[in-house]
Image (cartoon, rainbow, N blue to C red):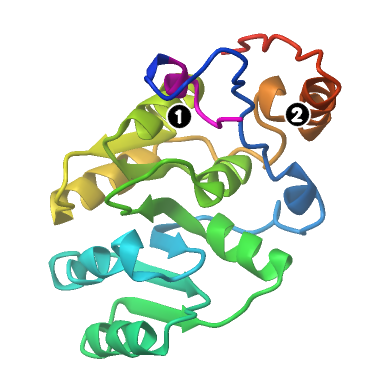
Amino acid sequence: MFLNSFDQDQTYFRVGDLVIPHGDYAAIASGSDVEGVGRDDTRVIVFGSLRPYKGIESLLDLASDLPGLTIDVTGRASDEAYARDLVTRAQDSANIDLNIGELSDAELAARIRRAALVVLPYPDLYNSGAALLALTLRRPLLLSDSPTARELQSEFGSALVRTYSAPLTAPDVSEAVAAARTIADDDPGTLTPRREWATIGRRYSAAFRGHPMEEVDHR
């Protein structure tokens, strides 16, 4: 099983392999009272499990060049040394809002909805639940250019998914925020039919029974 359509063009994709995409987070969105959370057009967020491979420090290091923005870093850090490094990087910047710890689904959804833009500065992105949670909550993304980012952009549009060529720069962030401010503040909800869990469940069930369903492209 693979998560991305571009996997089909790779040498490791064999006869009988399937692409079943990652599902959306409509259940979290519907279970969270987030529709009334106002968007702060000066706020960007990176969230999720805070790990070194995600390049979070590359966004923190731009804080002094983004004085008009608040950078919200929210999530749990399993590596104490990395958590201390993030604290050190943030302590001299008044516009970094660092929140290391576990949040409920509702609390996290509210923080995401409060932001104008979600920045996921991962150097190597194969798939991202954080990206799909952001899109379910109708918040635009800024991602490093990659096959996965381009596939998301093709599916959801360049207004919701912007890419940059690494390394991440302050103009990349400020331009993405300016573009995000022009996007309608739509209510959260389901994404494309192919990412609804009922569809995904039927496809997995059919695959395990030995009768895989062909995916219908709803883009």
The residue at the point 76 percent across, 12 percent down is 213
Q: Is residue 178 left or right of residue 21?
A: left
Callout 2: SS: helix
**Which of the numbered marks, if any, corresponds to residue 174?**
none
Q: Position of residue 10 (x, y in %)?
A: 38, 20
Q: Position of residue 149 (x, y in %)?
A: 37, 34
The residue at the point 25 percent across, 90 percent down is 88
The residue at the point 73 percent across, 50 percent down is 29
Callout 1: SS: helix
Q: Around disc 1, counting alpha carbons within 10 Å, would you say few (fewer than 14), some (14 to 19), or many (20 or more)?
A: many
Q: Position of residue 90 (x, y in %)?
A: 28, 83
User: Magenta part of the protein: which range?
Assistant: 1-8
Image: 170 above or below 214 = below
Say which residue label 1 marks: 152
Label 1 and label 2: CA atoms lie apart by 17 Å
Quarter-wise, where is residue 3 in the image?
A: top right
